[in-house]
Image (cartoon, helix red, strand yellow):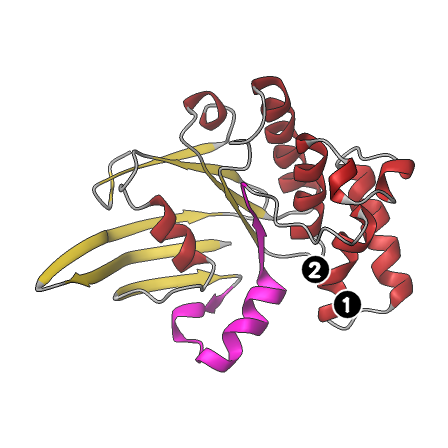
Amino acid sequence: MLKVANLTKEFARGDRKVVALAGVSFALGAGQFASVVGKSGSGKSTLLSLLGALDKPTAGRIEVDGQEITAVRDRALATYRRAKIGFVFQGYNLVPNLTALQNVMLPMELAGASRRERRRRAVELLDQVELDGAKQDRRPGRLSGGEEQRVAIARALANRPKVVLADEPTGNLDSQTGKRIVDLLRGLATSEQATILVVTHDMAIAGRTDVTFRLKDGRLVA
């Protein structure tokens, strides 16, 4: 479960105060697939940074799986991000000298999982995102953009996060591949019982999610 209450983020720009988010509130359950849409500057990226504990709000609360992360001390935030949050980036951000399988295993190694468990889970996830056996042993440079994004999605789910945050996950893909990636995310939200939140500018993509939030000037308008 993801709960956001009265989330506000302000920045100082010279002698002027800029309000990036203003009193945003919503709740999503386990297994829900949601999207956030809005024009550039509407607050989408700020919201994603706050939910991922990459930045702190000026006011408000964020609760993930019963834990209020806005109250977590700085030293514990890295553990929170590793255990509770998965990130999917538009640019994939895969390690170029590791195979697809090794990329998915990496977060689990950092979390202290055994090699046997890391490999088993990585193979399972890559199978779920429909990257077949031979391609699992390829490095990113030998994969298509859609295949790289599948690896990135599998990696984001490696440590069984409660929340997966996806920043324009179809932005570098053709429309057909993008739709397939969205369908994969929808299926994974259910099978992994994770709350998946996608930031997108594409209304066709947003229309395929369970819930769509629209931001305008830092406020939730729909």
Residue 57 picture quarter: bottom left
- Residue 48, given in percent of the width and then of the height, sits at 42, 51
Q: Are marks 2 and 1 in contact (CB under 8 Å)?
A: no
Give me the C-alpha separation between circle 2 and circle 1.
10 Å
Judge whether 69 appears above or below 37 on screen: below
Q: Decide which of tag 2 and tag 1 comes sooner along the chain.
A: 1
Q: Mark 2 — residue?
A: 159
Amino acid type, label 1: Glu
Q: Mark 1 — residue?
A: 109
x 61%, y 33%: residue: 186
Q: Nearer the viewer, residue 85 or 25?
A: 85
Q: Which residues are magenta?
A: 66-90
Judge whether 181 appears above or below 100 on screen: above
Element type where label 1 sits in the image: helix
Question: Callout 1: few (<14), some (14-19), or many (20+) C-alpha neighbours within 10 Å?
Answer: some
Q: Which mark is residue 160?
A: none
Q: Is residue 82 magenta?
A: yes
Residue 201 picture quarter: top left
Amino acid type, label 2: Asn
- Residue 6, given in percent of the width and then of the height, sits at 26, 57
| Circle nearer the viewer, 2 or 1 | 1
- Residue 1, given in percent of the width and then of the height, sits at 51, 54
